[in-house]
Image (tube, rainbow, N blue to C red):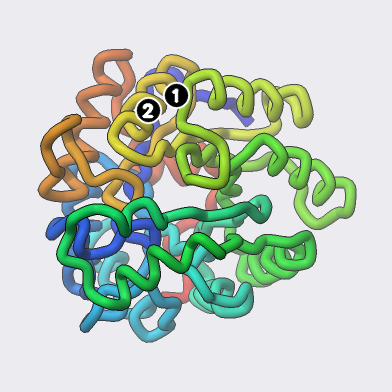
Amino acid sequence: MNQSMNDKVIITCAVTGGMTVPAQSKAIPITVDEIVRAGVEAAEAGAAVLHVHVREETTGRPVADLDLFERALTELKKNTDAVIQPTTGGGRGMTVEERASVLKFRPEMATFNAGSFNFGLFPVAARDLPFADWERDYLEGTTDYIFKNTFADMTYMAEQMRQSETRPEIEVYDVGHIYNLEQLVKDGVLEPPFNLQFVLGVLGANAAEPDQLIHMLRTAERVFGRDAFTWSAAGVGYRGEFGLAALSLILGGNVRVGLEDNLRITRTENATSNAQLVRKAVDLAATFDRAPATPDEARQFLGLKGAAAVGF
């Protein structure tokens, strides 16, 4: 497996998610219709992969509701040829069984979290924003929240993905997660080649700093070998998102942007849509003579089974 497509880059758009709450931005899609519209626009702007959470439509609270997932995945597939990548990360308070339930739809690809860590969103609650009661409770509750991904959890998730023939995108939030992955390989739970997503900037895990991304990349290369994985980088916050995107492009990796991770298009201006963030990533890639990969190019590079083999 080659690490880089040289003149192409796979852009993933994290359309919505559990890291943000609606009070932070009116651009965050909440209903299924809004999520589908945002996903289609992001794909049209250049995203080959759409990373999808769903939210309770009346409140915006992150949920693992299978009816909402089925509607969102089905409509996205009807309206775009992008790779549709549902989350198994879920949100605060969800069990691993709830998080894995989306695999019943047999997606081409889904996220696989490579370890546990503190997941702190609570500093957001101190901002002067019109929070709903559930939003403030949700954010402040993360002072005591561990994003739980034990070895037993990861083994369970890997088996569910094996049964659904879903390719994992392995979310690596800190360098220790690489060694977790090494143990899972020794135990026969997972095997290379891998698709790694280095997610940096979550409070409680590694920082969205250039030297940290390079450290994690070089560690993965030492542990598994340069040809054992493809990789991408996702940074939280404006500086993290586009700073790591630029570095990833320089180093030959792929990039993830989207309103799940970052709400700003400039340091001082809020983004109006996911598509706006994708277009900025496309423009940034052009600076390094790399063009956005098509969904079919992404499927081939990532080793996916194809849209015809999903269950939605």
150 to 183, vertically: above or below: below
Helix, strand or loop at mark 2: helix
Q: Amino acid at mark 2?
A: Ala
Q: Amino acid at mark 1?
A: Ser
CB under 8 Å between discs 2 and 1: yes
Helix, strand or loop at mark 1: helix
Q: Which mark is residue 6?
A: none
User: Which residue is more in the foreground, 176 or 76?
Assistant: 176
User: Which residue is more in the foreground, 14 or 81?
Assistant: 14
Q: Which residue is mark 2?
A: 245
Quadrant location, the N terminus: top right
User: Which residue is more in the foreground, 137 or 98?
Assistant: 137
Residue 81 in view, yes or no? no
Residue 108 is situated, as x and y percent measured from the top left of the image, at 50, 59
287 to 145, vertically: above or below: above
Residue 27 is situated, as x and y percent measured from the top left of the image, at 15, 56
Badge 2 crowding class, 10 Å Cα cut-off, few under 14, some 14 to 19, many 20 or more, is many
Residue 263 is situated, as x and y percent measured from the top left of the image, at 23, 46
Left or right side of 173 for 51: left
Residue located at (56% from left, 64% from top)? 144
Residue located at (50% from left, 60% from top)? 143
Quadrant location, the C terminus: bottom left
**Which picture quadrant has residue 62?**
bottom left
Q: Which mark is residue 248?
A: 1
